[in-house]
Image (spheres, rainbow, N blue to C red):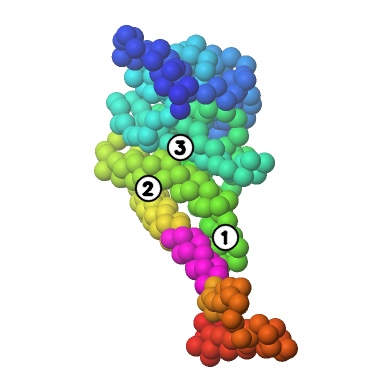
Amino acid sequence: MLQLLKKASEKVGLPPGSPVHVGEIKADEVKITLIDYDQTNYEERVIENIEESFPFKETSTVTWINIDGLHNIDIIEKIGGHFGLHSLVQEDIVHTGQRPKFENLDEHVFVILNMFHYREEKDDVDAEQVSIILGSTFVISFQEEEGDTFDFVRDRIRNNRGRIRRMGADYLAYVLIDSIVDNYFAILEKYGEKIEALEEELTTDPSIETLNTIHRLKKEIMLLRRSVWPLREVIGALQREESSLIGDSIMVFVRDLYDHTIQVIDSIDTLQEILSGLQDLYLSSVSNKMNEVMKVLTIFAAIFIPLTFMAGIYGMNFEFMPELKLRWAYPALWVAMITVALGLLIFFKRRRWL
């Protein structure tokens, strides 16, 4: 966070629309992938120079240009200059960590989303900013690093599965956004599994590590909600805004996407409530465990109080204590003390205090 703020300070004093990369550099090199297709033709390749994608702007086929890595400002400015991207749009693309947003420009539709990845090796969730530019016949996506949730989209294009090869660029943009939203459900399932494991741990052997895990998950869920909540506004704007780039045939899919977004938000709210309940359950479990310990200690104290009283009396070495001269005084005292202890135990058992 501090590193992000430090890099953001580099923009102070610059005019609006000055592209300055803000955020962590997650890719060593920028990778540019181009997919061009229509109902009968298909081409996919990795290009070395962004200029190789320029001729596809005017073609009648649908072109998808995906850029992994945002730290090379020169590439962003070149593609922005050729495809007519506003300077403020270029600035938003390289300024990571933004909330989801939607802008309906004259020749483009600009969308910013957050994509989440579950990392098995670290058992946590990583987020990256994804920017999508929709043009008349092309879609340009910008990602912070290589690796995304778009593999099944590429597979559908390669194998001509479904309607994607028969539809235009607006449908491709919808499919990309839909894949990001659908991946939220997979992330929430991971959190659900972790919460179920926490519930079992709380009922068996809660520890301070359990409480720390609850706090960590609450923080991650809160950040996830902060990233997803504005997405409802983005999808709602896609429905309301009138744009020549988005056909009426896509609206039914956008409405379904809006429903999925609401489900994601409801699921996140449910997880937050469950985690708050688990925190209360942990405190109750610890309190009950302490009460059990205190009950045992109290019972022991209650048993030893009369025994201590008896031992204290006969621990006083007065000369005229008649019991001190009796032959069976010592065993009799032991019998009396054992009888008192057993009597108290039976009494506690009958009262169900044990």
| Secondary structure under the numbered disc 2 in the rendered image | helix
Q: Position of residue 158 (x, y in %)?
A: 62, 39
| Secondary structure under the numbered disc 3 in the rendered image | strand
- Is disc 2 in contact with disc 1, using a CB cutoff of under 8 Å? no
Q: Which residues are magenta?
A: 280-299
Q: Which mark is residue 255?
A: none
**Few, some or many residues within 10 Å of mark 1 (<14, 14–19, 20+):** some
Q: Which is the main secondary structure of the residues drawn in magenta?
A: helix
How far apart, in angstroms, are the residues tagged by discs 3 and 2?
18 Å
What amino acid does circle 3 point to? Asn
Q: Which of label 3 and label 1 is nearer to you?
A: 1
Residue at the farthest front position: 319
Q: Which corner quadrant of the image does residue 337 belong to?
A: bottom right
What amino acid does circle 2 point to? Val
246 w.r.t. 135: above or below: below
Q: Position of residue 315 (x, y in %)?
A: 61, 73
Q: Residue at x 61, y 73 (%)?
A: 317
Residue that carries the numbered disc 2 in the rendered image: 254
What amino acid does circle 1 point to? Pro
Q: Which of label 2 and label 1 is nearer to you?
A: 1
Residue that carries the numbered disc 3 in the rendered image: 114
Q: Is residue 60 left or right of residue 120?
A: left
**Few, some or many residues within 10 Å of mark 2 (<14, 14–19, 20+):** many
104 w.r.t. 214: above or below: above
- Is disc 3 in contact with disc 2, using a CB cutoff of under 8 Å? no
Q: Is residue 261 left or right of residue 306?
A: left
Residue that carries the numbered disc 1 in the rendered image: 206
